[in-house]
């Protein structure tokens, strides 16, 4: 390996080492492992403290769902418990494999990783746009609208891109300290919003088991989207890190933060009335502006940077996993630049309807994907040939993985329930959206059958 290649393959060696991570998707060598398990909690707690979670909570009382406080809260809890558990299981794969999540998906998908890799790359840009929208509006509120939206957006994009370019350790360090700051700031927001909370919300005319399941799916989709990122932020941990503790910290970090913000949105939804403002302005309205409102905007800005830095980082790894040969920091910068354009598209379009559509459409395929990854991991007992996984040219076709993914996704289409399309099965179930469950089961079973009938796994197990 020449000097240039060595310089481009740099990686952090300890906590606080902000060396630019040039290392791409190859497994982290055992000699390069480090880090405390407690940081798994902060890396997942911080990015959920964003207006998108608040906005999800307000949907529980919307006319097309119509749940009251207790039913809405139960749906939020159930959705987040299930989704956080799935992410926790996947996060535990990081120390064992030393690989990020989409790159590790080369195990079942082989060369067809191009499909999930490209889809997730686009999804990270979409999530960037959703969150950056709120962060830029926070600057708008703080400055009284004196800074044009594109300029405010540029500030957000630059901050998140810098973190993702430096990479793994910069993100972990930022999330660690931001966790404490955002906890305190959103605690102040929650106390300030207390007078506007209504725990006697009456069920709307649309409340039913079907709409309860729909709200569970919407709430869960927020955390479920993190499944594609899970091992990205645990792959540097020592290989003998206890899987149970990684699962526990991941589960608690995601579950507590998402449930908190979503429950806050639900509790104050009546006070918002028929407001069509974005969640940033709604939060400012609820706390009454002033100093508390300014603190809320500061929290939203830093929360946006926290979540989007992770989007950019995972997006950079997804592009590499798909076989694109590009330096990882440059790949992260590309995601940031494209997210700027995507956010402007939302700004000049109808954000509210686009938000609801994005929330489900960009996550529906995750159920089949997660099932395939977990079944494959089980079949091979967590063992694989690292060199063959890292080299795209040496990957097998991965046909079974792609077939199971497509069939699982197609089988779930009749169960869709979102504004662009409501499937016949969703109507038959009273509006219940069980897309994730159907896709997960169909893809998982089909992949298991295909692999067992072939008597092999997609990438041979190491000797």
Image (spheres, rainbow, N blue to C red):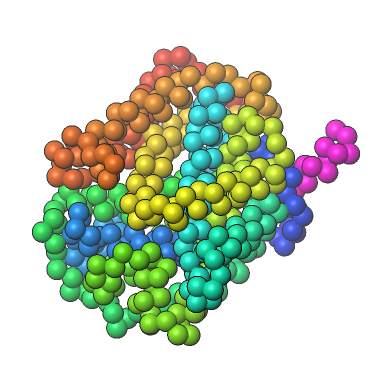
Q: Quadrant of residue 334?
A: top right
Image x and y of residue 249, in percent? 50, 58
Tell me if residue 288 is in the magenta stretch: no
**Residue 257's image quarter?**
bottom left
> Does the magenta portion include 5?
yes
Question: How many marks are shown on the rendered structure?
Answer: 0
Residue found at the very far bottom of the displayed protein: 291
Image quarter of the N terminus:
top right
Q: Is residue 195 above or below residue 134?
A: below
Residue 275 in the image, given as x and y percentages of width and height: 29, 68
**Quadrant of the rendering where the C terminus is positioned:** top right
Using the image as rendered, state which of residue 253 and residue 237 is in the foreground: 253
- Give the residue drawn at x 26%, y 75%: 271
Q: Residue at x 77, y 55 (%)?
A: 19
Tell me what residue is drawn at x 54 percent, y 18 percent: 397
Outermost residue to the top: 454
Which residue occupies the extreme left position in the image? 205
Range drawn in magenta: 1-11
Name the residue: 56% across, 52% down. Answer: 340
Q: Quadrant of residue 180?
A: bottom right
Residue 179 in sight here: no
Q: Is residue 326 visible?
A: yes
Does 212 sit left or right of 408 as displayed?
Answer: left
43 vs 333: above or below: below
Residue 94 in the image, given as x and y percentages of width and height = 58, 44
| Residue in the foreground of this view, choosing between 90 and 351 | 351
Instruction: Find residue 130 and report its horizontal and vertical position in percent.
Output: 45, 54
Residue 5 located left or right of residue 118:
right
């Amino acid at each position: 390996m020449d000097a240039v290649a060595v310089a481009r393959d740099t990686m952090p060696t300890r906590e606080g080492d902000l060396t630019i991570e040039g290392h791409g998707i190859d497994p982290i060598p055992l000699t390069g492992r480090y880090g405390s398990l407690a940081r798994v909690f902060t890396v997942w707690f911080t990015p959920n403290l964003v207006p998108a979670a608040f906005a999800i909570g307000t949907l529980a009382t919307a006319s097309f769902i119509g749940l009251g406080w207790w039913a809405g809260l139960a749906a939020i809890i159930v959705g987040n418990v299930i989704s956080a558990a799935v992410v926790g299981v996947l996060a535990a794969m990081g120390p064992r494999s030393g690989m990020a999540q989409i790159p590790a998906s080369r195990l079942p998908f082989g060369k067809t990783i191009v499909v999930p890799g490209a889809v997730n790359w686009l999804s990270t840009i979409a999530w960037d746009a959703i969150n950056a929208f709120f962060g830029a509006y926070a600057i708008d509120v703080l400055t009284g609208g004196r800074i044009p939206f594109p300029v405010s957006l540029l500030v957000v994009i630059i901050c998140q891109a810098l973190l993702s370019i430096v990479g793994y350790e910069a993100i972990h360090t930022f999330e660690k300290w931001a966790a404490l700051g955002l906890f305190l700031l959103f605690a102040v927001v929650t106390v300030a919003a207390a007078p506007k909370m209504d725990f006697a919300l009456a069920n709307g005319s649309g409340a039913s088991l079907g709409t309860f399941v729909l709200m569970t799916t919407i709430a869960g989709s927020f955390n479920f989207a993190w499944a594609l990122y899970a091992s990205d932020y645990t792959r540097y941990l020592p290989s003998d890190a206890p899987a149970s503790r990684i699962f526990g910290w991941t589960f608690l970090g995601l579950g507590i933060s998402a449930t908190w913000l979503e429950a806050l949105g639900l509790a104050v939804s009546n006070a918002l009335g028929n407001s069509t403002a974005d969640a940033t302005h709604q939060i400012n309205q609820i706390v009454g502006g002033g100093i508390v409102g300014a603190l809320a905007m500061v929290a939203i800005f830093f929360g946006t940077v926290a979540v989007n830095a992770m989007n950019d980082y995972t997006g950079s790894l997804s592009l590499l996993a798909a076989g694109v040969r590009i330096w990882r920091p440059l790949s992260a910068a590309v995601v940031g630049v494209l997210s700027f354009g995507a956010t402007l598209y939302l700004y000049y379009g109808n954000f509210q309807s686009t938000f609801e559509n994005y929330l489900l459409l960009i996550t529906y395929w995750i159920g089949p994907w997660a099932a395939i990854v977990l079944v494959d991991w089980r079949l091979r007992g967590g063992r694989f040939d690292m060199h063959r996984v890292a080299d795209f040219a040496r990957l097998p076709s991965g046909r079974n993985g792609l077939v199971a993914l497509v069939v699982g996704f197609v089988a779930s289409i009749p169960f869709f329930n979102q504004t662009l399309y409501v499937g016949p099965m969703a109507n038959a179930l009273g509006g219940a959206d069980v897309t994730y469950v159907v896709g997960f089961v169909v893809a998982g079973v089909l992949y298991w059958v295909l692999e067992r009938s072939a008597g092999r796994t997609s990438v041979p197990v190491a000797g």
